[in-house]
Amino acid sequence: MKKPVPSCSLSPADAAFLYLERKEIPMHIASVCVFDGPIPFQDFVARINSKLHLVPRYRQIPVIPAWNLSLPTWEDDAHFDIRRHIFHAKLDPPGGEVELQALAGRILSQLLDRSKPLWDMHVVDGLEGGRGAIILRVHHALADGISGTELLKTMLDSTPDVIPSAAGPRFRARRRKAVDHSLVENIFGTVNNALGSLFTLEAGLLDMAKHFLGGKNQSDVKGLVEVLPEFAASVERLPFNKPCTGQRKFCWTEFSMADVQTVRESVGGTVNDVFLAVLVRALVGYVKLHGQSAVNRLVRIVCPVSLRQNGQNGALGNQISFLPVALPMDARGPIRTLQAVATRTEKMKRSGAAGLVGLAAQWIAAAPPPLQALFWYSIPNLILPVPLFNLICTNVVGSPTPLYAIGRRMLAAYPQVPTGYDLGVGCAVHSYDGRLCVGLIADAHAAPDVERLRDFLVLSFRELQRSVEQKKARKASGTARVSEALEQEPTEPVQPDSPASGVAGTPMESSPSPVAAHAKEAA
């Protein structure tokens, strides 16, 4: 008789995403990928099937033990069938972005079926302009943003050459490990895991103490002290900070990476700082649209931070911490907003704030698995008087070169980050082939007009570009000091001329749809 192969336990972070999930909080990451032509369905299925041996986790399901006495494990799916994971869909006419975004919203509203491996793909036909699309979902317990991007690169091809799909190694599910352990054995394993987590926590505390007490880091500690009062201030709910229902809307836009880099080089900061500044200005317009004020107001945003070392990008699971930033909504003009963002994010990064959040996660991981499960199961049931933060914004570096599916070039990949609880909107950014692709996921009840926020993003970036160009012109002519130019910046974000009631992705008539623009380029 063949001996059972030891199963692979989920990490405490991976398991947390399983415990947190319910219909109001689907816990998958996703991407809507648009291609320059229709994707042959059967050929695509065969191509993915030939690559599955490269990602064994795609044939495994999470198994939660009785009473949560230990962490869940990944076990081979004895009934794996790729036809239960890749589906064929067709858009209703006219097949524009409105219809594609509506389909994506319906798919992203659904929970992944835990009786089979936690991923699926929808190959979409019927897009106008003869294009194609793939909507990919992967559960957050299986991958974080970095490993999710690596999965996408594995599933697609780096060249347009259509190579016949050779059959991969035959899959034979490993027999599941016996689960009839005694209660004493389970308790022993639980204590052993808890002790291991405690040692990890102790090491983390020592490293953090060295960081804060080291003389060369005193300026970093001072920077943290300077921004702490902003975190101590009460967080006000934005219009979309409401309990979520589970029904989702999804929309997107994109920016030229070259344009983003031009702004960054002129003003300073990182690519992520530039986008956060644009997001803050967009939120100012959105809250004003809903009758709220931005004066003396902070928006608290949580940015996931990768903890992966070099060479670990392809490793599955979650290796992330979170960097919280409190950003002012009433800075005078877009350039000063960017400068305020860059200053605060730099102070938070240098102070080791993400490490502090990581220590909190390690503290939870040090608890026995039953208590971990109880903690994460309970979190969604707690609605606080004020939210701990307003939204999550994640930025993942993608492929700088084009990817292909059966010879079809991927034009854009719009990412989705899970949201829920009382966070009615989530924002994800993904760099790809010279573009910065932005996806906004929203609860349909908390933010039914999320397209307006998308419109404000487009207008806010144009506003920032215009201010940078004016700054350069004044500096070149010598007719005004840079500080004087900053004083002349507009303090209010530009307002859209009309609601986003037309084609999604076209905030103004003069701005063509990003995907339509790709189709024109391809033609």
Image: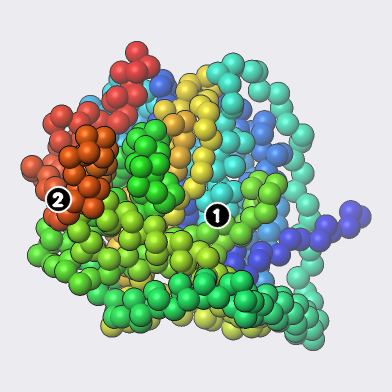
Q: How much space separates mark 1 and mark 2, taking CA atoms?
A: 42 Å
Q: Is residue 288 left or right of residue 315?
A: left
Q: What residue sits 27% from the left and 51% below the top?
A: 335
Q: Percent from the top left, x then y, of residue 394?
A: 44, 54
Query: Could you say whether the residue bearing mark 2 is in a helix, strand or loop?
Result: loop
On the image, the x and y values in percent for residue 214 come to: 64, 76
Answer left or right for 414 relative to 13. Answer: left
Residue kind at label 1, given as amino acid type: Asp
The spot of residue 34 in percent (x, y) is 40, 31
Looking at the image, tell me whether mark 1 or mark 2 is earlier in sequence order: 1
Can residue 197 be spotted in the picture? no
Q: Which residue is mark 2?
A: 488
The way the protein has been coloured in the rendering is: rainbow
Q: Is residue 510 above or below residue 398?
A: above
Q: Would residue 203 be visible to someone looking at this image?
A: yes
Q: Quadrant of the C terminus?
A: top left
Crowding around mark 2 (Cα neighbors within 10 Å: few <14, some 14 to 19, many 20+) is few
Quadrant the N terminus occupies = bottom right
- What residue is disc 1 on? 144
- Please, what secondary structure does the residue beneath circle 1 have? loop
Quarter of the image where one finds residue 426: bottom left
Q: Amino acid at mark 2?
A: Gln
Question: How crowded is the residue under tag 1: few (<14 C-alpha within 10 Å), some, or many (20+)?
Answer: many
